[in-house]
Image (spheres, rainbow, N blue to C red):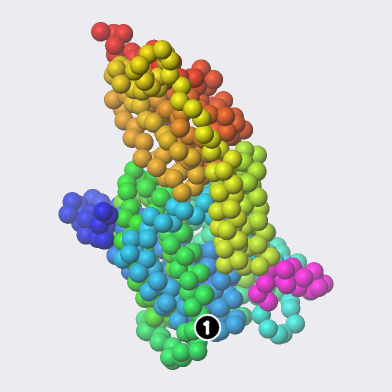
Amino acid sequence: MEKLKPKLFSVMKTYSAGQFVKDLISGIIVAIIALPLSIALAIASGATPEMGILTAIFGGFVIAFLGGSRVQIAGPTAAFATIVAGIIASKGYEGLFYATIIAGLILILMGLFRFGSLIKYIPYTITTGFTAGIAVTIAIGQLKDFLGLTYPPGDPIIETIDKVKAVVVNIDTFNWQALVIGLVSMAILIIFQKFLPKVPGSLVAVIVSVLLVIIFKMNVNTIGDLYEITSGFPTPKIQPFSFATIRSVIPDAFTIAILAAIESLLSCVVADSMINSKHRSNMELVAQGFGNMASAIFGGIPATGAIARTAANIKNGGRTPIAGMVHAVVLLMVLVFLMPVAKFIPMPTIAAILIMVAYNMSGWKEIKGLLKTAPKSDILVLVVTFTLTVVFDLVVAIEVGMVLSCILFMKRMSDVTNVEGWKYIDDNNDTETDADSLDLREVPKNTLVYELSGPLFFGAAEKIMQISIDDKHNCLVLRMRSVNAIDATAMRNLEKIREKCEEKKITLVLSHVNEQPMNVMKKSGFFEKVGEANFCAHIDAALERAKSFDTKTEEK
């Protein structure tokens, strides 16, 4: 059973001064990247700029200290923006405080009761759909500041459809100077992301846009025009107790907890693949719980693992939780000594940063691939989840997406279930022989053989990643005679196995692929990448094919 032990306590046993230097440098770089993002994401959430930094400081430090990942960087993320904005608008900061505290408790319980592995039962199409939906809602929400529009005073506009209407109605208030700053910022972000990915483009965009506004005295709203900027060492901000408020935010708390669990564990999985490590999912959930509670107590918003910042940490040499803790400490110093400078940041620049965040998180390439290659039922779940996220909200999208996935799952099961009589080699022989048995077969020394059994759907797709590939073998045979059906999530994991084999120069051979999986493989392009010659009708043919790659045997 997986340990409930923070990774920090494990890695410190072999920690070195050299690794500390790498973690220190990486933590400082990630803090520079996180600074403008934290401010932008807080504003997108309807909160104050410093609340985003407080989230990265306290949520980020606690999650790094207690987390189940070696390299996770936590803080405010775009996924929470619309949820937090809705809570603040309807229930105020008091409601957000208790929603985040309760979400933290839920996450801790999820970890203690070993729910970390249950996240795999949320299909890839649902996570892709709602992530893209959130990206669209964030981008639409930035049109006001990007175009410099002015809205009449009144209640804040929360719903995405209402935001679109407001843009159309108030388009006559367009400010060309704001658009210029927005376009310049966007150009800087695109150029640095494409050609200088190691340089924090968002920080460069902030500096350039501030100088342009000051030098040319441009009529553009800045953070200081809309928000009161405060600095100083943060202190706990406990909201007054209200049973009515607590009861009203329980659904919001569950939404925050589920989303935090999904986002953080997805980030951990991505990080694992980058550093060839294995995170502790249940410990990560416990850390997320304590991190969110710490963030709320010190005046922050919900926090979770940030995939982009975690990847930046890895690329800059961070390999232990020390890097995440350094990132939090650096941001604390910025908050205490430099926060008033943030009042000069133009709002169109913040909008440009958030539009780029939305673009990067949208996963449009994955969606394009799924629309072309996935089974129609998976495409339906993806489109429905995406649409409901944009038109309604994330809770409705996930609920409907899960129900729809389960219904389609049951339909697939009924479609692929068959009852057939046994077939024997020789009906006149009293001994019943299984022609497909591996008994008495000789497996070449260069070959690994794995047998996949049962339908490969999102609930079981993770098992594919348990296939172990090493440098001692140059051929991997996947026996699939008992796989009746496969979906997009499992197909994605098979593609990962193929990529690993290609990287290690191992030939992938598949035996006895049934009709439905074969159709999905051909539609996705997997069949073409593996090569027709490496699809064998029977295990004997697959082993014979594998034997032809046994160069060591031939040399002997």
> Residue at (31%, 55%) from the top-left corner?
280
Q: Is residue 165 magenta?
A: yes
Q: Can residue 220 be seen in the rendering of this structure?
A: yes
Quadrant of residue 241 in the image? bottom left
Q: Would you say 128 lies left or right of 463 here?
A: right
Above or below, 483 against 236 in this view is above
Percent across and percent down for residue 474 are 35, 22
Q: Position of residue 225 (x, y in %)?
A: 61, 80
- Tell me where residue 451 sits by quadrant: top left
Quadrant of the drawing holding the N terminus: bottom left
Q: Main secondary structure of the magenta part?
A: helix
Q: Position of residue 401 (x, y in %)?
A: 59, 58
Q: Which residue type carries mark 1?
A: Ser
Q: Quadrant of the C terminus?
A: top left
| Residue 533 drawn in magenta | no
Name the secondary structure under disc 1: helix
* Residue name at image x 43 percent, y 62 percent: 261
Whether residue 365 is visible: no
Q: Nearer the viewer, residue 342 or 169?
A: 169
Q: Is residue 206 above or below residue 512?
A: below
Taking the image as shown, residue 495 lies to the left or right of residue 188, namely: left
Nearer to me, 412 or 277: 412
Q: Residue at x 40, y 25 (%)?
A: 477
Residue assigned mark 1: 248
Q: Magenta part of the protein: which range?
A: 157-172
* In the foreground, 384 or 64: 384
